[in-house]
């Protein structure tokens, strides 16, 4: 009975994994370009995005500066803010409220995404999937962001509707950020910032601001131990690891970070609840750390100092190489209150993720990639018949990553090629894939019909999966045509 | 007695003569302020800094700052040291006037209280520096009084232009003060007639 309970949880997780990652487009909350900024500065989306919602060098500098222009912001604002106290009130502090400001107009934008899906033939044994879905509404998102003065900024995005169902979405990011807190410690500019709320971790490549129609597979990888208790060696009780943590979902907590040296060096340290959008059912907190260094490869030192370089046909991103590393550590808790094994205490299974990444930019070409390793401790009861304690079993591990290239044939026509791979022996033994490694190629083309309207084509050639009850395999390949616009 | 009368007449003649000469020789400083990183070149104070060894009498005329439509008018006022400023209230709501310091010196802070429409309060500014005027009822209101040591000053118009009249010939230190910009200092030599000066204020 106990084993069945554990197994049902594992099965649910696996089902979620399969559905979310391999068959349909993911409907994760997606933050994006902010039309409110276009209005505030009366400027095009292309000021900050070469291919929205991905940020170009200027967009990154704008974001790092607390959603303000990197230089002379005041002179560019076309909608003067509402002052919540004159600047001179600073002199009166602490005997008066510290002065702030509100955006001049309500800083709200909307984004709507949907797609047409063509799927290769999926065996009925897996479940019926129509070959063509003419249009699937994905997300309708409300976006709001701005600044409350020189140092305070905010961001909120919420999926009002997901998959055509009203109020079916949930909040993506919602945080308050204090920029350049380090100035009070006489640290170099932008060395220390802090943000509090719900936010995407400082991932090397944002999933929320991804240009892709589908998630990076490695970001959706969860650790689930062997479901076959015989394979685990403790029949009828399976291994315990059942860790829902994935990188692609937002986290709740507090993050310290900085980007001194003109943003070329970045660091962040976040303490988070650790269980994505839902409150974690445990007392321990998780820690995420990231560091990266960008090498500006422009030959002209004056160009290197500019926010963006100037090309013959307009501004462009600097030729640069960024390398970075990241790690995540947490302790997953199971069997709280004896839910799985009534006579045994809570299980605390430490887990970690480590990885490294790079990004190279050269004119109209960008190439980026990431490699990651995951390790989850896995314990089992010492005696299936009469358990008195837990003992360590084989840990659940996986590795994987992705490499993606992007090329601008024209400013409005962008070609993509992406390769995802996840090596998970445990998933393989759980019958999810034919081999240890699941991989897919995803070539694509994106067309900016307007600066705020995009058509996205993506083909996914996926790994082989077993057909249940047979010795045959199939590929859940697919072709997606997405529409994406903001206003 | 006659000798005394003659001497007095002579001195009076000399005094009038010298005044006429100096008035005839006084020049104007004209120019334009351009800004870098600031929204506007308006409301920038331009003034001749203290002249060593030179003291000027306190002006008898009062300066005036009104409070209209929930704003101090004008936003920037330059006054000579020891000038009395009259604070009016033309609004139908009460306003308060205070300044937390003068150029950071909190000992020079002032609080004039709160008063209603049509009333007036006055204050004599004896110390050079900048007073940030605030209203503790309406925190979005602010204005600045720049107290300088000389009677030679001006405030830029919307184009950044300014004109300081009646400056005796000589070499002076010309300074600017602005709400968001750094102080600019520039040496200027004034001769009779107009002396043109262009200044740049950076954020």
Image: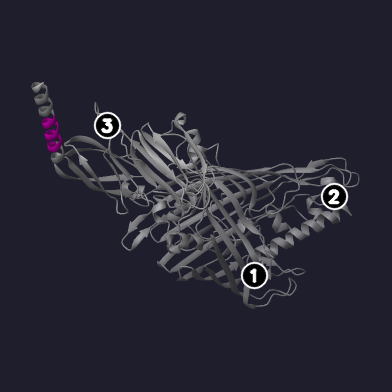
Which quadrant of the figure has residue A411?
bottom left
Tell me the quarter of the image containing the C terminus of chain B: top left
Chain containing mark 2: A
- The reply to whether label 2 and label 3 mark residues of one chain is no
Viewer-nearest residue: B27 or A212: B27
Q: Are marks 2 and 3 in contact (CB under 8 Å)?
A: no
Question: Chief secondary structure of the magenta span?
Answer: helix
Seen in the picture, residue A366 relative to B140 is either above or below; the reply is: below
Residue A17 lies left or right of residue A155; in this view the side is: right
Write the start and end of the magenta stretch as one range.
Answer: B12-21
Q: Are marks 1 and 2 in contact (CB under 8 Å)?
A: no
- The reply to whether label 1 and label 2 mark residues of one chain is yes
* Badge 2 element: loop
Viewer-nearest residue: B198 or A252: B198
Q: CA distance from mark 2 to mark 3?
A: 88 Å
**Residue B145 in sight in this render:** yes
Chain containing mark 3: B
Tell me the quarter of the image containing the N terminus of chain B: top left
* Badge 3 element: loop
Q: Residue at x 61, y 70 (%)?
A: A477
Mark in front: 1 vs 2: 2
Viewer-nearest residue: A133 or A302: A302
Q: Position of residue B6 (x, y in %)?
A: 9, 25
Q: Label 2 crowding class (10 Å Cα cut-off): few <14, some 14-19, many 20+?
A: some
Q: CA distance from mark 1 to mark 3?
A: 90 Å
**Which residue is labeled 1 in the image?**
A476
Residue B19 lies left or right of residue B119; in this view the side is: left
């Amino acid at each position: 009975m106990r084993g069945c309970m554990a197994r049902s949880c594992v099965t649910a997780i696996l089902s979620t994994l399969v559905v979310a990652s391999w068959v349909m487009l993911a409907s994760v909350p997606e933050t994006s370009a902010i039309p409110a900024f276009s209005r505030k500065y009366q400027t095009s989306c292309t000021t900050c995005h070469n291919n929205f919602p991905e940020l170009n060098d200027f967009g990154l500098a704008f974001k790092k500066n607390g959603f303000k222009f990197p230089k002379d912001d005041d002179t560019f604002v076309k909608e003067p803010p509402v002052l919540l106290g004159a600047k001179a009130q600073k002199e009166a502090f602490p005997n008066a409220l510290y002065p702030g400001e509100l955006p001049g107009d309500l800083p709200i934008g909307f984004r709507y995404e949907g797609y047409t899906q063509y799927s290769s033939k999926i065996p009925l044994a897996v479940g019926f999937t129509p070959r063509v879905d003419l249009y699937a509404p994905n997300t309708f998102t409300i976006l709001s962001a701005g600044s409350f003065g020189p140092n305070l900024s905010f961001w909120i995005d919420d999926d009002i509707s997901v998959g055509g169902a009203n109020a079916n979405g949930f909040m993506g990011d919602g945080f308050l950020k204090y920029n350049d807190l380090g100035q009070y410690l006489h640290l170099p500019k932008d060395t220390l910032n802090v943000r509090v709320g719900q936010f995407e971790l400082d991932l090397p490549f944002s999933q929320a601001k991804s240009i892709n129609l589908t998630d990076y597979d490695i970001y959706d990888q969860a650790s689930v131990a062997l479901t076959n208790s015989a394979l685990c060696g403790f029949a009828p009780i399976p291994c315990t690891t059942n860790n829902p943590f994935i990188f692609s979902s937002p986290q709740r907590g507090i993050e310290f970070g900085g980007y001194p040296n003109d943003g070329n060096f970045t660091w962040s340290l976040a303490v988070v609840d650790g269980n994505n959008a839902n409150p974690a059912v445990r007392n321990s907190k998780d820690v995420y750390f990231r560091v990266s260094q960008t090498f500006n490869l422009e030959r002209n030192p004056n160009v290197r100092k500019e926010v963006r370089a100037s090309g013959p046909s307009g501004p462009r991103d600097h030729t640069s190489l960024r390398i970075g590393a990241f790690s995540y550590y947490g302790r997953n808790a199971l069997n709280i209150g004896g839910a799985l094994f009534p006579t045994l205490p809570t299980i605390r299974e430490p887990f970690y993720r480590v990885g490294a990444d790079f990004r190279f930019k050269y004119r109209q070409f960008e190439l980026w990639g990431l490699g990651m390793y995951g390790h989850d401790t896995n314990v089992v009861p010492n005696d299936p018949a009469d358990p008195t304690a837990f003992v360590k079993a084989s840990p659940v591990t996986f590795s994987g990553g992705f490499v993606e290239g992007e090329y601008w044939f024209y400013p409005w026509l962008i070609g993509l090629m992406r390769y995802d791979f996840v090596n998970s022996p445990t998933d393989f033994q759980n019958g999810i894939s034919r081999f240890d490694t699941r991989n897919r190629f995803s070539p694509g083309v994106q067309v900016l019909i307007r600066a705020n309207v995009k058509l996205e084509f993506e083909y996914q050639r996926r790994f082989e999966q077993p057909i249940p009850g047979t010795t045959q395999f199939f590929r859940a390949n697919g072709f997606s045509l997405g529409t994406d616009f903001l206003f | 007695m006659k000798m005394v009368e003659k001497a007095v007449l002579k001195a009076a003649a000399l005094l009038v003569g010298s005044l006429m000469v100096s008035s005839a020789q006084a020049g104007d400083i004209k120019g334009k302020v351009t800004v870098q990183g600031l929204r506007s070149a308006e409301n920038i104070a331009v003034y001749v800094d203290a002249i060593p060894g030179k003291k000027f009498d306190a002006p008898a005329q009062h300066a005036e700052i009104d409070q209209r439509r929930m704003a101090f008018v004008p936003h920037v006022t330059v006054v000579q040291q020891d000038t009395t400023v009259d604070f009016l209230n033309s609004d139908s709501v009460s306003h308060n006037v205070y300044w937390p310091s003068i150029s950071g010196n909190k000992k020079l802070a002032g609080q004039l209280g709160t008063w209603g429409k049509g009333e007036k309060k006055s204050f004599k500014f004896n110390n050079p520096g900048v007073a940030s005027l605030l209203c503790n009822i309406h925190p979005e209101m602010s204005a600045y009084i720049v107290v300088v040591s000389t009677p030679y000053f001006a405030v830029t118009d919307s184009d950044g232009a300014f004109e300081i009249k009646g400056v005796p010939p000589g070499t002076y230190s010309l300074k600017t003060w602005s709400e968001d910009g750094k102080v600019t200092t520039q040496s200027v030599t004034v001769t009779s007639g107009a002396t043109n000066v262009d200044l740049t204020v950076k954020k």
